[in-house]
Amino acid sequence: MKPSIHKIKDFLEEQYLRFNNPGFIDSDPVSIPHLFTRPGDIEIAGFLSATLAWGNRKSIIVHARQLLRLMDDAPRDFLVNASPADLKPFQKFVHRTFNGDDALFFITALRNICQQYPGFEPLFQSMNEQGAAHAISRFRSLFLETDHLPRSEKHLANPAKGSAAKRINMFLRWMVRNDGRGVDFGLWKSIRPAALICPLDLHTGKTARMLGLLQRNTNDWKAAVELTGHLRRLDPEDPVKYDFALFGLSISREI
């Protein structure tokens, strides 16, 4: 018999509290932005580590750390002040299909954003009224204004073409949520947690389907929206907090 919505909520609340704690950080890509204290550095380190967040988590962390070291562990200052000679080491960077050309493009695109905006938050404020898909697409368009090879576009999710946009949604969760539990940063005060979309991947999708929170078989944008809609029934103000529970239960192989 399918468990009631109240039993699912109680279960996920318990698991959310279990997995959402500082002990979660070291083995997760969120550990990279946690190396920094200045908001501008946290944003850039978070965006880059989220961009690399597919595949083995240990490999993600190693390569994200390597990328930040190439930026002298001062990412915002590096973006603003780096010379052409400072950019040359990025040509040898590789993480899975993200190569040196992609790294150089991301660095120059981020520099362009830093020169125009005080931070990332204004670029996503339309989430509150127009939704996450609109905000992500708007950010993507701005990012792609910098000259780039067509191959690099695959590293920027496009909800308009059906992508679940797991990595950018994860980055947004890090920046927006602030529950005081030490994992998410809550740097952005103008965007409501209720506007977030749950990061959807094989792990969260598997758990969500087993709990009856997701019917759609494909892990695409429609599925992410469907899942988030069910999570809003559990917590209308902060639905994406259950990402901790869904992901944690899967990687711990408990469900």
Image (cartoon, grey):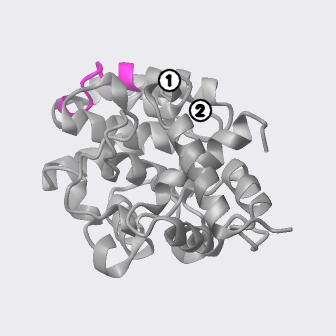
Please give left or right for residue 225 compared with residue 78 in the image: right
Q: Which comes sooner in the sequence, label 2 or label 1?
A: 1
Question: Which is more toward the observer, 70 or 52?
Answer: 52
Say what secondary structure mark 2 lies in. Answer: loop
**Amino acid type, label 1:** Gly
Q: Is residue 223 above or below residue 79?
A: below
Q: Is residue 36 visible?
A: yes
Instruction: Report the magenta residues as a range.
Output: 68-77
- In the rendered image, residue 63 lying in the magenta stretch gets the answer no
Provide residue 75's location: percent of width, then percent of height: 27, 30
Residue 155 visible (yes or no): no
Q: Measure the alpha-carbon separation of dots 2 and 1.
A: 26 Å
Q: Secondary structure at mark 1?
A: helix
Label 2 vs label 1, nearer the camera: 1
Q: Residue furthest right?
A: 1
In the depicted structure, whether residue 121 falls above or below residue 16: below
Q: Position of residue 255 (x, y in %)?
A: 79, 45
Instruction: Give x and y (percent) for residue 111.
Output: 24, 44
What residue is at 73 percent from the left and 51 percent from the top? 202
Q: Residue at x 62, y 57 (%)?
A: 200
Question: Which residue type carries mark 2?
Answer: His
Which residue, given by chain and number where applicable, does mark 1 sit on?
A: 23
Query: Which residue lies under the disc numbered 2?
Result: 95
